[in-house]
Amino acid sequence: MRSGKLVSRLDIYIFRQVLVALLVTTGGLTALIWLTQSLRFVDLVVNRGLSLMVFLRLTSLLIPSFIAVILPITTYIVIQFVYQRMASDRELTVMRAAGLSPWALAKPALAVAVLVTVIGYGLSLWGVPESMRSFRQYQWEIRNRLAAFLLQDGVFTPLSDKLTVYIRSRDTDGTLRGILVDDARDPTAHATILAERGRLVEGPSGPRVLLIDGSRQVIDHQTGRLDTLTFKQNQIDLADATKDDGTRVPDMSEVSLSALLHPHPLLERDRGKWIAEAHKRLTAPLTTLSYAMIGLFSALGGQFRRHGNIMRPMVTIGVMVGLLAVGLAFGTVAARDNRLIFLLWLHATLPGLICCWLLLLPSIRTRSVRIGQPRTAAATV
């Protein structure tokens, strides 16, 4: 009973150490990646007039994809760190002296890895597609319905294929100076509109540009004559001008697994890429278990040394870098030729199976020796 309680307490201790370290490491790396990636969208707030809440909402939708990518890597890092720390503090020495085998010491970390794998599947099959769908949709709305805020000083901004707007400068009160609009929405009356100043106003269907003191120039196709109309005020509806006629085409990252496995007939040319992406979603969470086994074999496998062994961690770090590079290469070749999709499954499972076998091998040999010893003694008698 005491031995069982001791093992249970040690399991809980190791499990808590690995889990807490994993939460802290994953949270820190996610925040760092979010900060670096969100810098791409800072221009929306600083120079284009969108609110801070729009920025936070848009960039926060990318967080699930960051977590899904780094979870397998952080699992390896945390297991390597926790077990190496316990080895340097002689905790592993005490646990081995208490009779715990490498496999028994590995079970708490494997429990964390299994939990992370389940979370990874939840993110890969549901969380990431949903968040990316919301991200793409919100980004599309910003580009179309809020296109007026994307106008830049001194830049010809194409709000659609048929409407281009140029502004020379923008005052602190929001007044636009030196406005030029190339309007080709009416094919029979391609117009060029000039205005001294203007202002963005809110219309019933979205933003509009109120033009003041300007002229509208249209070429008469029948006579070839340039017709010029001056005006005091005129309005252009940017929301209707930038609204797409068709629906937004979904990206691979935002569709469901079934949609990836059975792509739309219109996407037949990219069928191989979509099917490969589906298998990536199914295999990516499994790499968590493989990477966890690599970390456990690095810390617990091989000949035990009280003062630790720096060579195994260094070798496994090199192996991890190689596996990450090979995973990217396998994803590329599988997208080109779906007959090579099995490489994705081998990459996700084979390293873990090999490390599992290497970690169990000493225990198997020890059991076989123990079983063989009584037989040898009996035969001698």
Image: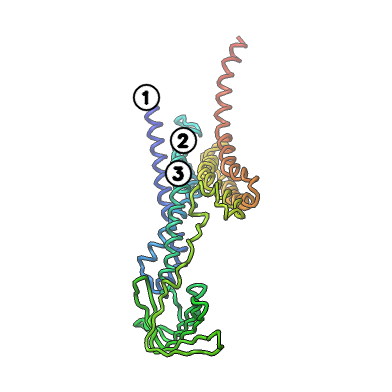
Disc 1 element: loop
Q: SS for tag 2? A: helix
Residue 1 numbered tag: 1
Q: Residue furthest front?
A: 222
* Residue 101 spot, x, y in % from top left: 49, 31
Q: Residue at x 37, y 66 (%)?
A: 54
Q: Amino acid at mark 3?
A: Val
Amino acid type indicated by mark 2: Lys
Q: Are marks 3 and 2 in contact (CB under 8 Å)?
A: no
In this rendering, would 370 be left or right of 141? Answer: right
At label 3, counting other C-alpha atoms closer than 10 Å, the crowd grade (few under 14, some 14-19, many 20 or more) is many
Image vertical order of residue 331 relative to residue 48, above or below: above
Report the residue at 47% width, 29% height from top: 99
| Front-most of residues 88 and 258 | 258
Kindly indicate whether the residue at mark 1 contacts the one at mark 3 (C-beta within 8 angstroms).
no
Tell me which label, 3 or 1, sits earlier in the chain: 1
Q: Which x, y percent locates residue 275? A: 57, 48
Q: Quadrant of residue 341?
A: top right
Residue receiving disc 2: 107
What is the distance, in whole Å, between disc 3 and disc 1 at their CAs?
31 Å
Label 2 packing within 10 angstroms: few (<14), some (14-19), many (20+)? some
If the image is split into quadrants, where does the N terminus sit?
A: top left
As drawn, 56 above or below 123: below
Report whether 234 appears left or right of 248: left
Which residue is label 3 attached to? 116
Judge left or right: residue 11 versus residue 373.
Answer: left
- Sequence-wise, which precedes: disc 3 or disc 2? 2
Please state which of residues 240 and 50 is positioned toward the viewer in this rendering.
240
Please identify, in this view, whether the residue under mark 3 or under mark 1 is nearer the observer.
3
Q: Amino acid at mark 1?
A: Met
Percent across and percent down for residue 220 are 53, 86
